[in-house]
Image (cartoon, grey):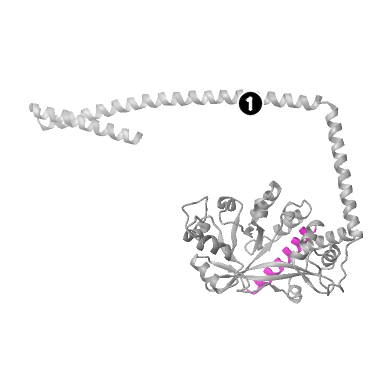
Amino acid sequence: MQKITGGLLFFGCLFLSLAVGATLWRAGWGAGAGVAGAIGTLGLLGATCALAASVNDKRQLRRELAKVKEAHRLLADAMESTQGALTQLAQAIESGPLSRTDALTGEVRMLEDMVQQMNASIEERLANPAVPDLRATNGKVNGNGAPATVHDALAEGRVDLYLQPIVTLPQRRTVYYEAFTRLRDASGHSMTPAEYMSIAEEEGLVPAIDNLLLFRCAQIVRRLGRQDRKVGVFCNISMASLGDETFFPQFLDFLGQNRDLKDALIFELGQAVFEARGATEARNMAKLADLGFRFSIDKVQTLDLDFADLQRSDVRFLKISADLMIEQLLEMDGAVPLPSKPDIQAADFAPLVRRYGLELIAEMVETERQVVDILDLDVPLGQGHLFGEPRAIKETVLAETDPPSEFVRSTLHSVERRLRH
């Protein structure tokens, strides 16, 4: 606005000076007198405008100084008020009744009793595990698993790594793998997470499984790196691990010592788990992100996601089942795919995901027909049995990689101490 006003004043002064010069010339004073009069008038008007501007600037400066002084006075009053409140708080703490301390002591004692009861319950379960009759089940564990079987598999290192490829579309070139853990019972039967995870959660062993999975993934990444294969590995991590005060520091320390893995290891969580994260879990996710590691969300239940929250949380991959995308984008019968974004059409979904820095992966792809549909939706990556089932990594392959680090030794020692103490 100041530039516009200055321009108008300049042209006004110029017009007035030209008018004076023209008047002198028409009055018979000659062209020289007219030019001199125009220049003189322009100079006089310019000086007057400059003086007026200087006076205006001084007035504005005085007003700004008055505002600063007033703000300083208000700040000083606020600081004085805050200091008084802090003094009163300190006095209240020093002279507070001892009954409050007694109450807190009682609460602490009650918590100690609860912890002791929990420990006794765990020790009782460990001392009397429900061992299944392997002969009656042909060497297999039922769907609910058994604590003793899970304990023995972890303590004896019967933890296998399975990898499933994630491919580019339509080329179907493998660019990532997803890693899965499988526990083996004494008979050699491989147990899926559905069989052992509920027991592991009840016994507090999920962080140990996550740590072992992490190390196995690191082994594979190292081996692929030696073969000049730039392939990333998706490694599942649980909220139990992110919130565990014992395991997470070991987890973070190991990754801090292996920051070169940040471009190859991606930590994956389910949508429901991610959205239910607490302050501790969110803070620990941020610590992993500070080291340069990225996150992936799978088990997506709706396409109407909070993409801004995913971006803020350093999520870089979004896995959605092929059937869900086809159902909510291609077979919607005129319905709006994203109620929170009614202007987004089916063809806009993939560009929307990319706009928030996310790579879209169609998972659970089982048929060629699904591939045709997800290509119509401009999905760049796919995962599913059509492109390759999870395959076990041979022990000999893992044995050729680096020996276990102190991180793994401490993890195994912690598991054994808990299971056998």
Q: Is residue 389 visible?
A: yes
Q: Is residue 58 above or below residue 375?
A: above
Crowding near the residue tagged with mark 1, few <14, some 14–19, many ≥20 C-alpha atoms within 10 Å: few
Magenta segment includes 207: yes
Residue 357 in percent (x, y) is at: 54, 57
Per the image, label 1 sits on a secondary structure element best described as: helix
In the drawing, does residue 108 fall left or right of residue 287? right
The prevailing secondary structure element of the residues shown in magenta is helix
User: Quick check: 180 above or below 202?
Assistant: below
Q: Quadrant of residue 326?
A: bottom right
Q: Position of residue 251 (x, y in %)?
A: 74, 57
Q: Nearer the viewer, residue 98 or 120?
A: 120
For the N terminus, the image quarter is top left
Q: Quadrant of the C terminus?
A: bottom right
Stretch in magenta: 205-227
Tell me if I can see residue 172 in this picture.
Answer: no
Q: Residue furthest front?
A: 333
* Residue ID for mark 1: 79
Residue at 74%, 51% in the rendered image = 243
Q: Position of residue 165 (x, y in %)?
A: 63, 71
Q: Nearer the viewer, residue 74 or 281?
A: 281
Q: Amino acid at mark 1?
A: Met
Q: Tell me which residue sits at (75%, 27%) in the image.
A: 90
Rendered location of residue 225, percent (x, y): 65, 70
